[in-house]
Image (spheres, rainbow, N blue to C red):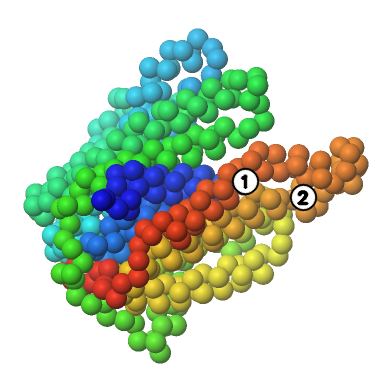
Amino acid sequence: MTNKKDSALWYVLLPALAMWLGWGVRGLFGHANGAMFPGAMVALAVCMLLRTKRFSVGVVVAMCAIGYGFGADETTLQTAGYLFGSNLDHVVKLGIAYPGLALKGGLWAMFGGVGLGTALAAYCYMKRDIAIGVVLMVIAFYVGWYIINRPRLIYFSYDRKETWAGLLLGGATLLAWLTVRGRTTVPLRCAFWAALGGAIGYPIAVTFAAMGRHSAHAAGHDWWKVAETTFGAFQGAGIGLGTYYLKGLLPDRESALPEIPVPAPHSWVWAVVGAVGAAFANTLYGGVLVGGTSRAFQHLTPWILLGSILWCIAFYWPRAAWQLGVTMTFFATATDLVLNWHHDEQLGNTGALWVVVSLATLFLAWKVTGWCAEADADIPRRVFLWLMWAFLAMSYLLLFVPRAVIHAPANAVSSIGGWWPYLLKAWGGGFGVGVGFIFAALVLAWWLRTGGVISKQPADSNKASQATS
């Protein structure tokens, strides 16, 4: 009798729900760094499902998470905006919107699939293969951008720059190199199934949101959040189904070497290095500065360049991969929360907020040093739950602690009939979103606790240096 953990349905449902929640939370924070969170979530779900296979968990999480950063540079909201109009131009533009949404949704998910597949098949590549591959990808990206995107030969937006042709040509070039050089189709298959889920899911998701906004009976709901979570679920389902069909191509755990633990006396050194490195990488792209924000660095280091560098770092140094996939992802989201509170809501003291974020990031970096040093097969589940609850807490702080609640005007409270009616109005659509998030998180926690997705085994889940040799 087939164990439910090994059924195709389980492979679809777990990544789909993980991405449903991850993409919904990601929509509150944005930017390429924010897109890393759902990438890390779906990668950890895949690691739990492939519990008997040999791979480096840290490298899988980092490369998948970093891969999802590439699509964040796309212009997607203007393309989606064509579906929300009601005039004649809206009808004409539908012929542009749906192909554009399918293309951009597929590309966004595809790069996550490329990172995932490359990490799973890391044993097929030498270190220089990845470096050469990303160089070819960057060159092809700029060729596609200069030939098609810059002159706007095929254009899916109003007035913003587009990068879809660059991403398409760059991704295809990288996949061709990885397939030929590694003599494996694992990255190609992962990319295909991820892109299929994204290409199908994004047009459907935006259509749901447009129908909801146009319905007089559905006013007041956060319909864009419906689109985000639906898009995430389709991506997760595609990645999960692809993983199910390619698992037979992956080597078993028994062929792995034991994990080399990080010596305990130096764990804090690794933690500090990880925290500082994650903060620097996020600052380099996002331009986060104490007391304000700047996008100057982002123009110098677009994700096509920074993401490529981070991919190489993750593949070359598995301990750094853990910090990139987990610590950097956390720091990016925490800084978005701080900047929102201080600059948008004008809440709190800047110095105190940054101290809290720094200490929390340092603590997480220390935890990561412990996770990467353990050979316990239960590590993916533990990291998954840590990340899920940490990001859920940050999303609740963003949703439910705005200035309108902390500094509620007395006349506004009295005019609406009391504190609780005012609170519900101030929260608005965030209340329904928060309930949906906690429900999904509880279901995931229950599944991982009772479903037996992964059991503790002394065998190693991977030796990163072996996988990247």
Q: Residues within 10 Å of mark 2 (few under 14, many from 20)?
A: some
The part of the image, by quadrant, that contains residue 8 is: top left
Q: Quadrant of the C terminus?
A: bottom left
Label 1: state its secondary structure. helix
Looking at the image, residue 238 sits to the left or right of residue 345; the answer is left
Examine the rendered structure and indicate whether residue 273 appears above or below residue 243: below
Residue at the extreme front:
1
**Which residue type does callout 1 highlight?**
Val
Closer to the camera in the image, 228 or 388: 388
x then y, percent, for residue 328 = 44, 63
Examine the rendered structure and indicate whether residue 276 appears above or below residue 425: below
Task: Please give the name of the residue rendered at 41% of the width and 83% of the height, measured from the top-left corner.
Answer: 267
Residue 405 tag number: 2
**Residue 238 can be seen, yes or no:** yes
x then y, percent, for residue 375 = 31, 75
Task: Please give the name of the residue rendered at 60% of the width and 43% of the height, measured from the top-left corner.
Answer: 433
Task: Please give the name of the residue rendered at 58% of the width and 44% of the height, measured from the top-left corner.
Answer: 436
Residue 435 tag number: 1
Front position among marks 2 and 1: 1
Residue 320 tag number: none
The answer to which of marks 2 and 1 sits earlier in the sequence is: 2
Task: Please give the name of the residue rendered at 53% of the width and 19% of the height, measured from the top-left corner.
Answer: 85
**Which residue type does callout 2 highlight?**
Val
**Residue 36 can be seen, yes or no:** no
x then y, percent, for residue 168 = 26, 38
Examine the rendered structure and indicate whether residue 427 appears above or below residue 298: above
Label 2: state its secondary structure. helix
x then y, percent, for residue 439 = 56, 48
